[in-house]
Every structure is written in C-alpha cells, then in structure tokens.
C-alpha cells in the first residue's frame, strides 16, 4: 500500500518548517482559517493542532471576531481596508518591542526589576493597542534574539588587579621564574541528597527523586599545576579548613623544596583560605604563597570548571544509595574525562588580558636579559 505521506521528512525538518510558518503567518492567514474551522464545528484543540498554533491564539481570534474587530472593515469612503493583524510580531513592530525590552519596567510605570511576558504584553497593548498570547510572545522574542536565561555576576571593571590576575594565569611557563609552579585549587561538595535541576521528562506529573533518609555529604578538593601535570585530590567530610590544610599538605609533599622552591596556589575568594586555622600553616611553609582569582569570576578557575562538569554529569539527579558508590562514580569520571575539562576559558582572551600578558612577558624578558 503506498504511503500517504508525500515525502519522508528528516527528524529535524518538521520543527524547522513549523517555525518558518509561525514567523511568516499573520493577519488573515491565520484568523480566517480559524473562523472557518470554528463555523465547521471544530474544537480549539483540533484547530490549534491543524494550524500548528496555540489554543490561546484560537480563543483570542474568536473574541476579536465576536467583537467585530476582525475582518475587512470599510473606511469612511466605503472602501475595504486591509485586515486587522491577529499577531503583534509583524515586520515593523519588532523595533518597538526591542526598544521596550532595553528599558527597565520602571520606565513604563511597573514596580518590577525585570520583564515578564504579562507586563510586556500589557505595555504593548497600552502603547500600540495590540495583544498577543504567551506562545506568540515567546516566538517573537526568540525571533529578535532574546532568550530567558540568568544573568551572570561580574566584578567591578574598575578593579585594577582583575586583568593582571588573569594575565599571570595565561602567561606561558617559559616566562616564569626558575623553578616556579602555579597551581589552581578548588573544592566542591558531593552530597548524597541529589541536587535538583531541569531535565527532559514526559508531560504531566513530575519525575520523583528519592531522598536518602539520613543525609550524608563529602567534599572534594583538587589542585592541578597551570602547566600540564598531575592533579591532586583530597576528600573530607566537609568543605572546611581541615580539607584545605589536607590539600596544602599534599601539595607540599608532592612538590619538594629541592625541585620547586616557589609554589603559588591560586584559589577562589573563600574565607577558609585565610582563616585563623590555616594562617599558621602558611607561616610554617613560606615557599607556598596563596593568590586569588578575580572576584565573581568562577570561569577563571579551570579546575572549578572541571568540578562543575562532574556536578552536572553525576551528582544531579543521581540514584546512588551509598555515598561511597557516588564517590567511585565521580572518581571514575574524573579519570576518564578530567584532563580535557580544565583548560582556560575564553575569558582569558579578552583584549585587556592580552595586553597585560604582553607587558608581563616583556618584563620577564628584561629580567632575564639583566
């Protein structure tokens, strides 16, 4: 029996064609088929599925038809004018939408700090006399390059050590002083209670994640030389000063003073690295010096990014019943995928960082020549 389909479509092709249809269809191209299908006795669900639209658009067009604001009205001279568009994201209105988004909601009288579609739709209706559904708004916002995502925190650009700190991490090892080693360090919690997060799941009831009953947690600390080299790890019950001292002791033992007279440990801005329980340790080991990454800059720490990959891969929504089984899975992932995950990010390629690297390299060359 021949197939009823004209042509077999690739898996991604129906979604692409549906998106093109939604971008190009407005006005009578959507409103009149809905009115005709409604007159034929079709339900809103059937019409939305048939026309690849949303039920809210069907209801909105139905209300406009009953109110007499949909169709081909006549002007005072008796001539029929163009149809009233049923969607707000026509060519020409995207500029007004973008201008509204660039302003804070307070500029339009809203007591909010960020835009949501409900307030944005009310603003567009008040200023342009137009309305749209949530689905239409989502498609329109995506069409002009906007998306729903979190803002990232950054430090004040006026902080002078920011570019210099990043430049010292990017400086090639050939320009370091003799027998100097720079080590990146970080710590991450590893809880038995699985942290939540977004995941694909069937529509309807949410997937369940079983709690462990008695909660347990371990913390893992890690360090790796900025130049290629082995990584060291420490494991403790909590992310505290004891775990910090354990990792520092490992670094001091594996890098003896005879081969590494100067060891810089670059850490994030955490108070436990300068706590009273750790300060005596630094005093007893003067060849080790602590340095800090720029504040509010988690991407600057390459091993922290590796720990983040482990968190997204294994600790989110895990089904382990025992903490030691989770620890073995994390250790196996680090051994198999770890070496390529802790490289420097694109943050170090900024123009100000590149200029600082060139200045430090010139100073190193002058020092060697002297």
Image (cartoon, helix red, strand yellow):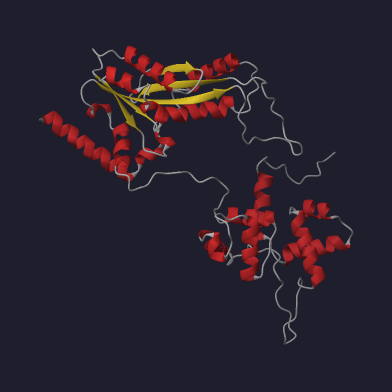
Q: Relative to 58, does residue 293 appear above or below in the rendering?
A: above
Residue under the image location 79 percent in, 60 percent down: 59
Q: How many marks?
A: 0
Quarter of image, res 248: top left
Residue 247 pos. (x, y %): 40, 18
Q: Quadrant of the C terminus?
A: top left
Q: Residue furthest left?
A: 370
Instruction: Judge by depth and name the residue closer to the eye, 363 or 90.
Output: 363
Q: Is residue 134 left or right of residue 294?
A: right
Would you say residue 285 is visible in this rendering? Answer: no
Would you say residue 295 is visible in this rendering? Answer: yes
Residue 88 pos. (x, y %): 65, 64
Q: Relative to 186, does residue 233 appear above or below in the rendering?
A: above
Residue 255 pos. (x, y %): 31, 14
Q: Relative to 95, does residue 151 appear above or below in the rendering?
A: above
Q: Quadrant of the N terminus?
A: top right
Residue under the image location 18 percent in, 35 percent down: 363
Instruction: Judge by depth and name the residue closer to the eye, 187 or 13.
Output: 187
Q: Residue furthest bottom?
A: 77
Quarter of image, res 357: top left
Instruction: Judge by depth and name the residue closer to the eye, 267 or 140.
Output: 267
Q: Is residue 280 left or right of residue 188?
A: left
Q: Residue furthest front?
A: 276
Instruction: Judge by depth and name the residue closer to the eye, 152 or 364.
Output: 152
């Amino acid at each position: 029996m021949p197939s009823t389909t004209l042509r077999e479509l690739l898996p991604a092709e129906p979604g692409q064609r549906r998106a093109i249809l939604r971008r190009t269809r407005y006005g009578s191209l959507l409103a009149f088929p809905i009115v005709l299908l409604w007159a034929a006795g079709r339900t809103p669900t059937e019409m939305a599925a048939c026309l690849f639209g949303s039920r809210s658009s069907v209801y909105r067009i139905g209300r406009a038809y009953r109110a007499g604001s949909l169709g081909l009205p006549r002007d005072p001279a008796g001539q029929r004018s163009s149809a009233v568009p049923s969607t707000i994201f026509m060519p020409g209105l995207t500029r007004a939408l973008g201008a509204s988004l660039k302003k804070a909601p307070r500029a339009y009288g809203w007591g909010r700090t960020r835009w949501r579609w409900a307030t944005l739709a009310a603003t567009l209706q008040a200023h342009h006399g137009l309305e749209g559904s949530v689905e239409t708004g989502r498609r329109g916002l995506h069409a002009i390059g906007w998306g729903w995502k979190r803002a990232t925190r950054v430090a004040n650009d006026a902080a002078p050590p920011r570019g210099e700190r990043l430049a010292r991490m990017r400086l090639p090892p050939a320009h370091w002083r003799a027998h100097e080693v720079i080590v990146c360090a970080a710590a991450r919690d590893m809880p038995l209670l699985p942290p939540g997060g977004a995941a694909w799941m069937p529509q309807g009831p949410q997937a369940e994640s079983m709690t462990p009953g008695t909660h347990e947690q371990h913390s893992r600390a890690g360090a790796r030389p900025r130049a290629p080299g082995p990584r060291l790890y420490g494991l403790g019950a909590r992310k505290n000063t004891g775990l910090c001292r354990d990792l520092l002791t490992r670094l001091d033992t594996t890098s003896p003073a005879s081969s590494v007279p100067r060891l810089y440990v670059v850490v994030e801005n955490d108070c436990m690295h300068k706590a009273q329980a750790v300060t005596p340790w630094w005093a007893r080991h003067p060849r080790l010096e602590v340095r800090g990454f720029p504040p509010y800059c988690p991407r600057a720490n390459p091993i922290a990014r590796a720990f983040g990959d482990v968190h997204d891969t294994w600790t989110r929504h895990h089904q382990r019943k025992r903490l030691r089984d989770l620890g073995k899975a994390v250790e196996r992932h680090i051994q198999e995928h770890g070496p390529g995950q802790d490289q420097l990010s694109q943050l170090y390629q900024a123009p100000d960082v590149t200029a600082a690297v060139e200045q430090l390299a010139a100073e190193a060359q002058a020092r060697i020549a002297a």
